[in-house]
Image (cartoon, rainbow, N blue to C red):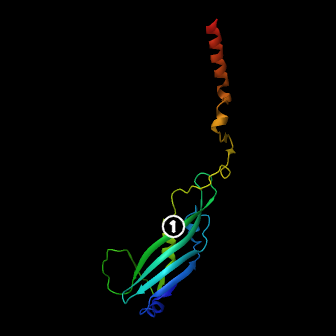
Amino acid sequence: MKWTINQLQKHRSKELKIDEYVNAEEIMKIDQSIRGVPPIHVTGMADIGSSKITFHLNIKGQLILPCSRTLVDVDYPINVDTIETFLLNGPNYETDEEVHRVKGDVIDLNPIIYEILLLEVPMQVIAENSTEEGAPQSGKDWEVIHKKDKKDKVDPRLAGLAKFFEQNDQSSDS
């Protein structure tokens, strides 16, 4: 999603409609927790003036992230509305809104879309159908113990201690 300023200035009298799919797989290199990024649908319009260009965008798609409990893939939906303003080589004035300065003759929205997608990645994702199948159930010197299995099981390291108390109970009864 790149345009030269001359291409955009041709649309100054009418608004520029945007309806494109963006390949955002580059963000998987930045954030290793993202397992996949199907094409992201970007729609919106651009208001083009003599000193600034404002993009009104809707970014819609999904990210494939690991479930925090089971590590299975989870499709995490993304739907973000954003307004991005680019100041052209006009006067440098201060504004309350966040703006981007145009360097050179090209406006590239891809880095901004990548940044927005990275900001949408949550700290934790939990799969709706969280089953125990996805997570490993045992490993070297460990295993998952369920409450029903734990009830009657005695730790082998403490088996000798249990016999000690049985002997004390028998000797106090006599």
- In front of the other: 147 or 32: 147
Please indicate, yes or no, whether residue 165 appears anywhere in the rendered image.
yes
Using residue 103 as the reference point, say whether residue 64 is left or right of it.
right
The image position of residue 174, as x and y in percent, is 64, 5
Residue under numbered circle 1: 118
Q: Residue at x 64, y 17 (%)?
A: 164
Left or right relative to 102: residue 64: right
Residue type, numbered disc 1: Leu
**Location of residue 8 with respect to 57 vertically, above or below:** below
Residue lying furthest front in this view? 129
| Residue at 55%, 66% in the rendered image | 77
Instruction: Assess disc 1: are there few (<14), some (14-19) or many (≥20) residues with their C-alpha within 10 Å of its C-alpha.
Output: some
In this view, the residue in front, 45 or 135, is: 45
Residue occupying the far left of the picture: 94
Query: Residue 63 is drawn in which quadrant?
Result: bottom right
The secondary element bearing badge 1 is classed as: helix
Residue 93 locus on image (x, y percent): 30, 81
Quadrant of the image occupied by residue 88: bottom left
Q: Is residue 1 above or below residue 62?
A: below
Most distant residue in the top direction: 174
**Quick check: 63 left or right of 84?**
right
Query: x%, y% of residue 168?
Result: 62, 13
Q: Compared to 98, does 16 lie above or below? A: below
Q: Residue at x 42, y 77 (%)?
A: 84
